[in-house]
Image (spheres, rainbow, N blue to C red):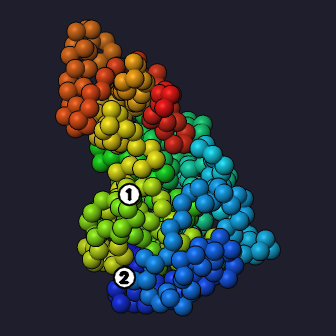
């Protein structure tokens, strides 16, 4: 076995040592924001706050929240605390729900990001002897370059394959002897499915681990991926506004993702009131970027719903762990007054042994919401008689009703009729005019 930690002095630091480091970095962040960002200075002045009021991480609750609209309102560079000459890279979100959110990086910021990604690779069993196959998208999206620079920081060999051309991906996995695959979980499913269709025995590939993130996935989907690719699948978390993948990551225990809290200080709040919730309670995840220079966000509301737990993990790491997000407050569906997360639906489908390829179609008829879950049949099911398929549809609808507390129609569609994604899977088609 290779190394157990990338930076053991930090990953296994005592809570007292972490507290002292976090408090120092928070003070530096607040000073940076106050002196270099009129947006934060005006907010703090309106609250009667000065940098001197923030001494330890316990004082973080005094600081204002930041939301995605603040980034859009200050588009493109209004939240940059460094001059253009100090920046070495700019990333941006896709902007599918409005103006893109733009993030700038100093060289130190890139080092911080790469450090977190390197920790994630080591936690998944990676070493500098390994070849890391990166199938996240490259470009303004943060996924590809995050794991790429993390692999290089570790000293491993990075293959910048990017997404798409799945058969070519598989050829590279075979010919280059890739050890670790990095991509979205839905794309990992597609790679496994394509291997099966090509008659490739994945147990003969050198591949032994996968690091998957950028979209919600379930434990059932983890098992599907592990079985189809003959690997161990690890979760990773990041978001472009804070940093790409490497903000948090799973270790071998897989009981939550360790947050790199020496760089990104986490809180869980009640999304309605802003009140900080105790460990173990689910709420909205908030990050303060205490390790960043160019875009040092205060108390950024991620909209991800999860919980935090503390204590030394069996792996030896002391950093707080976050649960896999249950969903997001902004992609949560409200169906006839009931909150529904796509991940809940996926869990039910996979529990029943159905295909992980599905879409949720929401319409409004006569002022009433209607939700239909379209699920691909397997080739074996598709040859079944109509009555048997209808019985299975009713069974699934009943299971969904039990879990969601709302009625959902179920419709089987032909194998491979749902468009495959080479990035984030598009699970929801909301046709309501709300």
Q: Nearer the viewer, mark 1 or mark 2?
A: 1
Query: Whole-percent x and y of residue 213?
Result: 46, 53
* Label 1 crowd bin: few (<14), some (14–19), many (20+), radius 10 Å: few
**Residue 363 drawn above or below residue 389:** below
**Residue 381 drawn above or below residue 189:** above
Is 62 displayed left or right of 14 in the figure? Answer: right
Front position in the image: 168 or 428: 428
Query: Whole-percent x and y of residue 326?
Result: 34, 51
Which residue is depicted at the point 61% across and 85% down?
A: 31
Front position in the image: 402 or 392: 402
Callout count? 2
Which residue is depicted at the point 62% across and 52% down?
A: 93
Which residue is depicted at the point 48% across and 39% down?
A: 425
Query: Which of the numbered marks, if any, corresponds to residue 328?
Result: none
Query: Whole-percent x and y of residue 175?
Result: 55, 47
Query: Whole-percent x and y of residue 157?
Result: 58, 63
Q: Which element carries disc 2, helix, strand or loop?
A: loop
Q: Which element carries disc 1, helix, strand or loop?
A: loop
What residue is pinned by disc 1?
Answer: 272
Q: Quadrant of the N terminus?
A: bottom left
* Label 2 crowd bin: few (<14), some (14–19), many (20+), radius 10 Å: some
What residue is pinned by disc 2?
Answer: 12
**Residue 389 drawn above or below residue 247:** above
Which residue is depicted at the point 65% across and 51% down?
A: 100
């Amino acid at each position: 076995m290779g190394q157990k930690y990338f930076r053991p002095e930090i990953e296994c630091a005592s809570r007292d040592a972490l507290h002292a480091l976090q408090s120092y970095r928070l003070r530096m962040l607040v000073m940076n924001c106050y002196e270099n960002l009129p947006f934060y200075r005006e907010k703090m002045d309106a609250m009667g706050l000065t940098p001197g009021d923030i001494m330890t991480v316990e004082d973080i609750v005094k600081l204002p929240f930041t939301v995605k609209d603040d980034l859009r309102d200050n588009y493109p560079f209004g939240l940059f605390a460094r001059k253009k000459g100090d920046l070495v890279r700019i990333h941006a979100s896709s902007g599918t729900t409005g103006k893109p959110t733009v993030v700038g990086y100093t060289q130190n910021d890139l080092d911080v990001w790469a450090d977190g990604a390197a920790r994630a690779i080591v936690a998944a069993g990676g070493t500098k002897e390994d070849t890391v196959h990166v199938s996240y998208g490259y470009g303004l999206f943060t996924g590809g370059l995050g794991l790429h620079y993390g692999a290089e920081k570790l000293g491993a060999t990075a293959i910048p394959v990017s997404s798409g051309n799945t058969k070519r991906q598989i050829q590279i996995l075979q010919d280059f002897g890739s050890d670790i695959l990095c991509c979205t979980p839905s794309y990992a499913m597609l790679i496994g499915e394509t291997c099966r269709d090509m008659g490739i025995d994945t147990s003969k590939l050198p591949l032994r681990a996968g690091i998957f993130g950028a979209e919600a996935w379930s434990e059932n989907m983890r098992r599907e991926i592990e079985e189809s690719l003959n690997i161990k699948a690890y979760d990773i978390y990041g978001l472009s506004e804070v940093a790409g993948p490497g903000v948090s990551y799973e270790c071998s225990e897989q009981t939550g993702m360790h947050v790199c809290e020496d760089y990104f200080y986490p809180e869980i709040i009640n999304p309605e009131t802003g009140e900080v919730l105790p460990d173990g309670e689910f709420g909205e995840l908030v990050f303060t970027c205490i390790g960043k220079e160019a875009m040092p966000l205060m108390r950024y509301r991620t909209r991800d719903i999860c919980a935090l737990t503390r204590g030394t993990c069996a792996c030896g790491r002391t950093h707080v762990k976050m649960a896999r997000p249950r969903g997001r407050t902004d992609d949560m569906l409200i169906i006839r007054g009931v909150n529904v997360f796509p991940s809940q639906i996926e869990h039910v489908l996979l529990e029943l042994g159905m295909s992980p390829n599905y879409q949720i179609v929401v319409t409004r008829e006569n002022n009433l919401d209607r939700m239909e879950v379209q699920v691909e049949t397997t080739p074996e099911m598709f040859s079944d008689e109509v009555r048997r398929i209808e019985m299975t549809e009713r069974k699934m609808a009943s299971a969904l009703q039990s879990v969601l507390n709302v009625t959902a129609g179920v419709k089987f569609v032909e194998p491979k009729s749902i468009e495959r994604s080479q990035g984030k899977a598009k699970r929801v088609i909301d046709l309501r005019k709300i």
